[in-house]
Amino acid sequence: MSFEREGGPSMSWSRTRFPLMTDFVRLTGNETFTDIDATVRDFWAYALSNLKENAARGYLAEFLVAKAVGATGPRIEWDAYDVLAPDGTTIEVKTSGHAQTWQRSGPVVLKFGGLPGSREGSKVKRSWSAATGEMIDAFVADVYVFCVQTTTADRPYDGLDIGAWDFYVLSGGVVAGTGQKSMVLSRVIRLGGEPIAWHDLAEAIQAVANVNRKDLNDFPVAPVETRDEMTEDLCIHEMAPGTCALCSPRAGNASATTLADTAVVYVSPSHVGHLAGCFHKGDDEDFCRWGEVTRPGAWQDLRNGRTVAADSGARVGLVANEACKSCVARS
């Protein structure tokens, strides 16, 4: 759940972990507040009792991973890595789940964000350091753990049931090699992730970390998915048939060729510009409400590093600040 972004000036970086801030005091829960009759445990119960909420569920997932590898350090907000194992293995934890505290509409999409993104072939990411208070170039984590709370909306939700979690483990090299900022669960599985239980998690993390260290200087680039493979991911296509520039024909859906012929560039909600007929998901696996740029020359502007904004379609004014690399290869 750590904050990641691209860009910014180049900075020196090191694989060395910065020391923790020295003014931190770990609370036990028995401490009392001044002026009110309440303990820290009372506050925790108020803020985190609903383990179904996304924030609390994410904290719990990080806690489960930390417990699995024997990490004892406290959680550090916005740090470069979510968990640091005692042997130095750096771990990023990504979380998703079937059930939500609100009423869903449409099919469930198990999706994970905050991935390294489009710096393909790079071993580093831009990340904020809690120790220095600055953006730094940090190594992509050794291991990514994708955590799925499997309880569906039609079943009682027990936030204390660790058996309701599935864990999928991939190396940082494999994740970075995709160039994606987000991916759905089926993509994680196709990259080699297999569902494992919590009691097998430590062994899986260690095995993947060992492989990742051996491959540190040779990040593999995952193959671009085919149009047929993308239809395996259920998303919100069914809610808006014919509006997704990534969706191939399937029950009730139209292909990208049914979209406006005048559109030069399609702008995705994650600010990536695509050409019509591009079926590479990249950063945009399951989005369908896109904007359209009908201005001639927009694609060339985007490729030359200039941003373009949608002037029609579902999201007028949405800005694209990078070109889809699959489209660039085709154009």
Image (cartoon, helix red, strand yellow):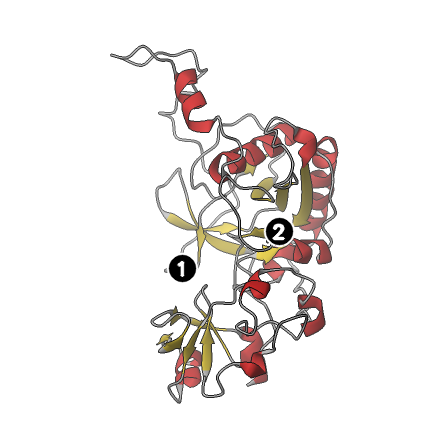
List x then y, in percent, for residue 230.
66, 67
Q: Residue at x 61, y 76 (%)?
A: 254
Q: Quadrant of residue 327?
A: bottom right
Q: Residue at x 52, y 81 (%)?
A: 259
> Mark 1 or 2 closer to N-term?
1
What kind of residue is marked 2? Gly
Is residue 53 or residue 71 the one in the foreground? 53
Mark 2, secondary structure of its residue: helix
List x then y, in percent, for residue 139.
53, 50
List x then y, in percent, for residue 80.
47, 44
List x then y, in percent, for residue 184.
61, 56
Position of residue 253 in the picture relative to residue 324 (left or right): right
| Label disc, if present, on residue 10 of the rendered structure | 1
Mark 1, secondary structure of its residue: loop
Please name the residue that numbered disc 2 is placed on.
172
Q: Quadrant of the C terminus?
A: bottom right
Is residue 314 or residue 306 the one in the foreground? 314
- Spatial CA distance of label 1 from label 2 is 21 Å
Is residue 93 or residue 229 the one in the foreground? 229
What kind of residue is marked 1? Ser
